[in-house]
Amino acid sequence: MSFRTSALRPETRAAKIAATVLILSSCTLGFLILSRRAGSAQSQPRFLLELRSANFADLGAIPRSFTCDGAGVSPGLQWSAAPAGARSFAIVMDDPDAPFDFTHWLVFNLPPEARGLGEDASGHRALPQGSMEGTNSYGRSGYGGPCPPSNELHHYFFRLYALDIRLNLPRGANRSQVDAAIAHHIIAQGQTIGVYRRAGH
């Protein structure tokens, strides 16, 4: 048996329209939630890497020799083995406590068999063959040490990414270029954080 919507009483017709809108809204919301979850799952790396430095503990103070108050050389870093399928590593060091996300160091196309970098590796032949450094927020290629405003404690994130590609970028690439190139290619990542305060400046 069929009937016309126009034949229904106004209050019944309004109720049916409201129910239909509610059902459609619920379906749309459910689809968006599932899509968002799927996207998040794809963007999350499948493995975690252990990243550490012999020069400072995680959340520990970075020694002056690795900052603008000292020699300003890059600290040593060590990390765990890359998962199968990794073709390169990339390192990003930044300071999210700065007025803008200040980038201190970009290294990319580190070979997948690499297990670390020695002290003062930046700008020297100590980097593994084929590795490249990008341009930091100081406007220079290579490592730029922490140099926060006087008496401000800043956190410096060292992030290591295992990628399923080698980046097709030139030496001196900037942060935006590196971020765009590694998007959707991260299969593992790790991080360690150092802090620094320029007391007395």
Image: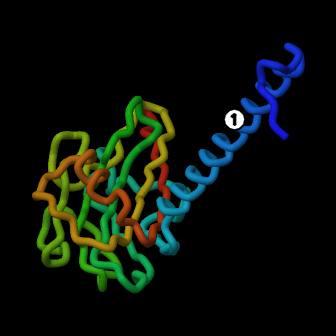
Check the image and report above or below for 24 versus 181: above
186 on left or right of 117? right
Check the image and report above or below for 10 versus 123: above
- Mark 1 lies on residue: 25
Residue, x 38% and y 38% (percent of image)? Answer: 101
- How crowded pointer 1 is (Cα within 10 Å; few <14, some 14-19, many 20+) is rated as few
Does residue 11 appear anywhere in the picture?
A: yes
Check the image and report above or below for 29 versus 87: above
Check the image and report above or below for 5 versus 122: above
Residue, x 81% and y 36% (percent of image)? Answer: 2
Q: Quadrant of the C terminus?
A: top left
Expressed as whole percent of the image width and height from the top left, the position of residue 112 reads 30, 81
Quarter of the image holding residue 168? bottom left
Residue, x 69% and y 37% (percent of image)? Answer: 24
In the image, farthest residue toward the front: 1
120 on left or right of 93? left
Residue, x 69% and y 35% (percent of image)? Answer: 25
* Nearer to the camera, 99 or 56: 99
In the image, farthest residue toward the top: 10
Name the residue type under label 1.
Ser
Expressed as whole percent of the image width and height from the top left, the position of residue 161 reads 38, 66
Expressed as whole percent of the image width and height from the top left, the position of residue 56 reads 47, 64
Q: Quadrant of the N terminus?
A: top right
Expressed as whole percent of the image width and height from the top left, the position of residue 109 reads 22, 70
